[in-house]
Structures are given as C-alpha cells and as structure tokens.
Image (spheres, rainbow, N blue to C red):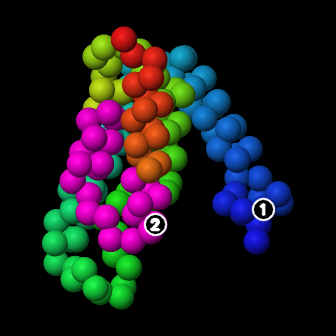
Amino acid sequence: YQGGNGGEELGRYNQLDSLTKTLYNMAQDAPDSAAAVWGRRLGIFQNAHAKRLRDSEFVAIDDENEFSAWPSSGTLLLLRALGHIFPMTDLRHVVTTPALLLIGQILGQTPVRSTEDVIKGLFCTTLMLEYTKEAK
C-alpha cells in the first residue's frame, strides 16, 4: 500500500503544490484573465454536476455499477487549490463566491450512496469550513 499520493516515486503532493504555486503567480500577474478563466471553469463544474445529478435519478440505489453524482477527485482538488489562489476574505469576489455556492450546491443536492460519497462529502465540508474560517 503506497498511500493516497501514488507513492514517493510519483510525488503527487509535490506536483500539486508546484501547480498551485504556478497558478497563484499567474493569477497575481493577470488577475482579470485568471478570474475569467476560473469563472468559466466553475461554470463547467456546475453544468457537469447538474448533469450528474440528472443522471443519478435514473440509477437504481442497489445498482452495482457504482455511479456517483459527486465531483471527481480532480475537481475537488482544483476547488481546494482555488482557495489558495484567490482571496477568501472578500465579501463578494468574482471567483470565490461562485465557488462557495457550487460547494454548497454539491453538499445540499448530491445523494450519498457509498462510502466514497461520504468521503467526498466530508472533503467538501472541510473545503467550505476552510473557505469561510477567515471571513468576517
């Protein structure tokens, strides 16, 4: 068992840290462009989640194909990186406010059908707490 990062030889945590630092620097260099790109990406995430919610209505609860309406791990990691790229303390921010709304929608509307869904739900809850802990 190598753990959740794929083992030392892959160094997934180091890759994610490097990617987040690069995205942060790019957002500092061109904040308007970064906000536009992330805004579009959040729209794509929201549309994909809405489709998965619609699709989940047609999957039987005891179905064995393990369908989940929860976002992928990659999407959740990007949402976590977003909290390190943009300021979470702004009352209304063009990127972070829609991200909070998306996470709230995910938590409020997505059905829990497996242990993996519970884990993703806990991760989303942690993200929401992380995003809002510094807000006043």
Where the C terminus falls, by quadrant? top left
Q: Is residue 64 above or below residue 100?
A: below
**Mark carried by residue 7:** 1
**With 58 as the anchor, is 135 left or right in this view?**
right
Q: In what element is the residue under mark 1?
A: loop
Q: Residue at x 72, y 62 (%)?
A: 3
Which segment did they paint magenta?
A: 99-121
At mark 2, the secondary structure is helix
Q: Let me know if residue 44 appears in the view.
A: no
Q: Which quadrant: the N terminus?
A: bottom right
Instruction: Specify the amino acid type for callout 1.
Output: Gly
Q: Quadrant of residue 65?
A: bottom left
Q: Quadrant of residue 39?
A: top left
Q: Is 4 left, or right, of 75 in this rendering?
A: right
Q: Position of residue 110 (x, y in %)?
A: 26, 58
Residue 68 visible in the displayed image: yes
Where residue 47 is drawn, which disc sits there? none
Name the residue: 44% across, 23% down: 133
Asked whether, in this view, residue 21 is left or right of residue 102, the answer is right
Residue identifier under label 2: 116
Q: CA distance from mark 2 to mark 1?
A: 21 Å
Amino acid bearing label 2: Glu
Name which of mark 2 and mark 1 comes first in the sequence: 1
Which residue is found at the position 46% from the left and 40% from the top?
126
Vertical arrangement, residue 102 with respect to residue 55, above or below:
above
Q: Is residue 69 above or below residue 90?
A: below
Q: Is 55 placed left or right of 82 in the picture?
A: left
Nearest-to-viewer mark from 2 and 1: 2
**Nearer the observer, 42 or 89:** 89
Q: Where residue 99 appears, x then y in whole percent?
A: 34, 35
**Magenta-colored stretch includes residue 104:** yes
